[in-house]
Amino acid sequence: MHSSFCTSLQIKDTIINSNQENTFARDTEILLESNWEFYWNKLIKPGDFNTNEPTAIVSLASWTQFKLPNNEKLSPLGYATYRLLFSVPKERPSVSLYIPRIYASSKTWINGKLISEVGLVGKSKDETLHRRFSQIISLDANETNFEIIIQVSNFYHNKAGISSPLILSSSFHLQSKKSKQIIADMIFIGCLGFIGAFFLLFYLFYWNKDQAVLYFAILCLSLSYMALSDRYAPLIVIFESISWILLTKIEYLSLFLAGATASLFFNEIFSTFIHRIYAKTIIYSFCFLGMLVLFAPPPYFTKFLLLFFIMMIVNLIYVAFVITKAIISKRSESILLLVSMLLGSIIFSVHIFFFLGNNEYAIIYVNFGYIIVFLLLSMLLMTRFSDSFKELERSKNLALQQKKEISIKSNQLSEVNLKLEDNLKLLEDYNTELDDFNHIVSHDLKSPLISIYSLVTFIEDDLKATLDENTKYNLTLLKDVVSKMEALINGLLEYSKVAKGNKRKQLFSLNDLLKSVIGVVDYQNKSTINIPDTDVEIYASKIELDHVFQNLISNAIKHNDKEKAIINISVTKLPDEYLFSVSDNGPGIDPEYHTKIFKIFSQLKLNDDVKSTGIGLAIVKKIISENKGVITVESEEGTGVTIKFSWKIQKE
């Protein structure tokens, strides 16, 4: 052993003078962090150091931070050998060496014996298999001088080499510390994993109306996986040849996913207080970080951790601001979330202090504290669920009450409908009886009227030589009254036929129909009747439309006071209906009579020579109404009449 390299010559003297045996017994930890020989780009084995000079004597840290004699800055990617010689008292308890997790593959010798190999140490990326595990190595109780040689190979992380000091302490203390760490990890990983799995199943199978439940579940599972992977790397055990770079990227993505879901969870809780672009900013930012981690080569992707922490600090400041707004608005969730945040901040501070201190139980308490924080957040979610469930129950009860009311109203409506159906049937029966009565009476009345007319004619013929002028006038007047009565009866028959007549629809030419009508009402061709320039094919009841035009055109001719009647007929086809117009140059109608002329038996004295029953326009209006149309009159007295009516377009 080369005493010139014994870093503990001073320690040895300290051990003797300070009764180091008792110090070991009191669980003292000696940090082996300085006076390490460092050999850059060399993998030196025991016995080969006489021919090699160290690159530098260093204190343990990432080798990118070493101050070399020529001020050279080392790349994080490469390989090196570390060597340390130290001594301990012979009279001592069982002593072990704790080697922390090294961000690289490593190979360790103690006093010339190969003790452990974590991964595969190589001089290139292809030769190296990265792994990261902490180790506790028991030192030989018969030795007092020790030589530690550690070969390190790093081709993936910006933290290169041995960045944390090795710890020398009693075996009992180190094993006890490891056991406490495992207990703390079991508490944290187990409880957080259970909480995450519970809320994920709760969201998937029971309550997927609240996105905050999903975000919280993913947050818990991500943190649980990170802790498990960082300390125990279970995937390495299952897949021995899996790439450590891939596992590290998964860890980083899990961390970013935890940050994103924590932010989105907060966004769901206080959505009414948060700016609408917050969620999009979070999603895009963390997706950007994730893409950088996925596609950036080692060791550059490991440098994005700082950017993540900066984003989270800014995020926490905004969260604190929003929670303050929510508290001012008296939101109950804000108090619980604020308590969780404060408690989490305190525990995080204690956690940092623990890593700087020596309290081996602190990590258990810290992890318990973290679990309490997540239980408080779970309580917040369950409170939201309870409130939503109560609201749902209230809505359900209200819906049931409304359903009962609707059922009652429905029963009442059914009763009314039954009565209405009975009334409609009764009305139909009455209408049928009325139509039959009208038809029968009209026919029965026509027979005596014809007889009366015939008798009056016979009397005139028999007594025409002896009748004076007054008697002749009275007999003529009697015949006119009988003729008018017959016309009224015929009108009633026509009105009855409109309701019961043939409704069969067919496709026909409007101009052909108008020519046919004109041939009947103006067979002597005494009037000027202008039909539309452009013919229109119409699908409707031809008989009904024929009847309408016969009435309108014949009225325009009969009531015209000019030497020659001029009648203009036009048509416009709209998407849903036809618009017809019949105008004349007659005497016109005063506006106060525009609606009266369509009432049955209504007559205007426009021309003393024209005999009218007052039924024709009533029939016209009834036909148009039954075809879902409207008839109107435009006229001033002395300016002619324009009658317009619409007619619903029927599908063929």
Image (spheres, grey):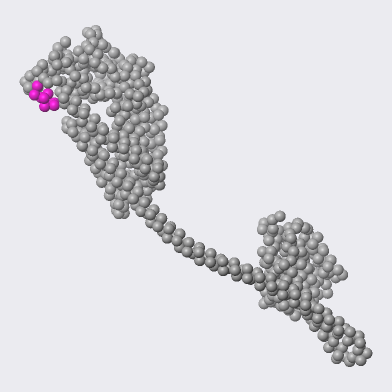
Which residue is located at x 58 percent, y 68 percent? 420
Quadrant, the C terminus: bottom right
Is residue 456 visible in the rendered structure shown here? yes
Residue 625, horizontal then vertical, whole percent: 68, 67
Q: Which of 506 and 125 is in front in this view?
A: 506
Residue 548, by quadrant, is bottom right
Looking at the image, is 79 positioned above or below residue 198? above
Q: Which of 126 and 292 is in front in this view?
A: 126
Residue 450, horizontal then vertical, whole percent: 83, 79
Q: Which of 553 and 548 is in front in this view?
A: 548
Residue 640 on the magenta segment: no
Horizontally, residue 97 falls left or right of residue 468, namely left
Residue 634, horizontal then vertical, whole percent: 70, 71
Residue 304, by quadrant, is top left
Which residue is located at x 84 percent, y 81 percent? 451
Q: Which of 88 and 281 is in front in this view?
A: 88
Which residue is located at x 29 percent, y 27 percent? 232
Looking at the image, is 105 positioned above or below residue 251? above
Direction top: furthest residue: 51
Looking at the image, is 306 positioned above or below residue 592? above
What's drawn in magenta, residue-wise? 21-30
Residue 22 on the magenta segment: yes
Horizontally, residue 502 falls left or right of residue 152, namely right
Residue 302, horizontal then vertical, whole percent: 34, 28
Which residue is located at x 29 percent, y 34 percent? 189
